[in-house]
Image (tube, rainbow, N blue to C red):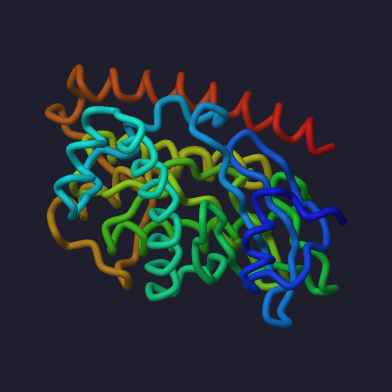
Amino acid sequence: MKIPPRLQPLVEDGLIDDVLSQLMSGKEASVYVVRSGGKICCAKVYKEIDQRSFKKAVSYREGRKVRNSRRARAMEKGSKFGRDEQEKVWQQAEVDALSLLAKADIRAPVPYGCFDGVLLMELITDANGNVAPRLNDITLTRDQALHHHELMINYVKRMLCIGLIHGDLSEFNVLVDANGPVIIDLPQAVDASANNNAKWMLERDVKNMANYYGQYVPELLDTQYAREMWALFEAGTLKPETELTGIYAESDADADIDSVMAEINAVMEEAALRRARLAEQEQVD
């Protein structure tokens, strides 16, 4: 296929040998199947900030540390240099998150590097070597849904143990290969300890998983894994090996106005994100 302009510099520099096909084009990025160093992989081309659907990216960026003080000041002022630097931080966040997930034994694509707004990473394939489908595009049995949900809760728990929350986890951001679910799309991953929105983002992520798998296993809809995890995380007792029950007894102190408003905001934002994902899928189809 014709080489997209954003990939041309990587071809010229020898980072990409050939562009084989376009995998998808969404509101946040376009993804291509490429050959690099004799290996078939993905090239994720991030779109400019004014073209992305993440209008509330500031809530995800809260708590992210920028070591260079000049960059930090420019980002705060919103200058062109600052916006460019913010884009680099946004893109690097996904590379960093993917690297951390690999070390924590969480299934996600292996990153190979981010070059000029293009993330090269592992291509996830199914048992036949084809591009793995999204969770939203497959049908599961009850037993498969139970097993996959258990895996996903374990991944979310392990992420929280290393201080990360996906922030946009849904059936649209999970691929399924021969070994089960694989988490993708992490530029918005948040710092669980430094972001004031972390708790309700965690709850939204876990609720999305319960809602999806709950269509096959209705009893999952009543589980409270997010609140159980968060309580253990706040107490400093959440470990990768911690066995979760999905049961959480809420105290009167927990049911305050702030938590209610946070839940309302989470529902509203989730509805907006889901509409955007569905619209994106219709474009691909």
* The one of 246 and 199 positioned closer to us in this rendering: 199
Q: Residue at x 17, y 45 (%)?
A: 70
Q: Residue furthest front?
A: 12
The image quarter in which residue 249 lies? top left
Return the x and y of residue 7 as percentages of the image width and height: 67, 56
* The one of 125 and 155 positioned closer to us in this rendering: 125
Return the x and y of residue 207 as percentages of the image width and height: 47, 39
Return the x and y of residue 277 as percentages of the image width and height: 64, 32
- Relative to 27, 102 lies left or right: left
Q: Residue furthest bottom?
A: 38
Classify the position of the C terminus by image quarter: top right
Return the x and y of residue 82 as percentages of the image width and height: 30, 37
Up-down relation of residue 116 to residue 201 (above or below): below
Up-down relation of residue 261 to residue 86 (above or below): above
Q: Residue at x 46, y 68 (%)?
A: 106
Classify the position of the N terminus by image quarter: bottom right
- Relative to 155, 236 lies left or right: left
- Relative to 97, 252 lies left or right: left
Q: Residue at x 78, y 32 (%)?
A: 283
Please tell me how many numbered marks the rendered image carries.
0
- Relative to 197, 180 lies left or right: right
* The one of 135 and 24 positioned closer to us in this rendering: 24
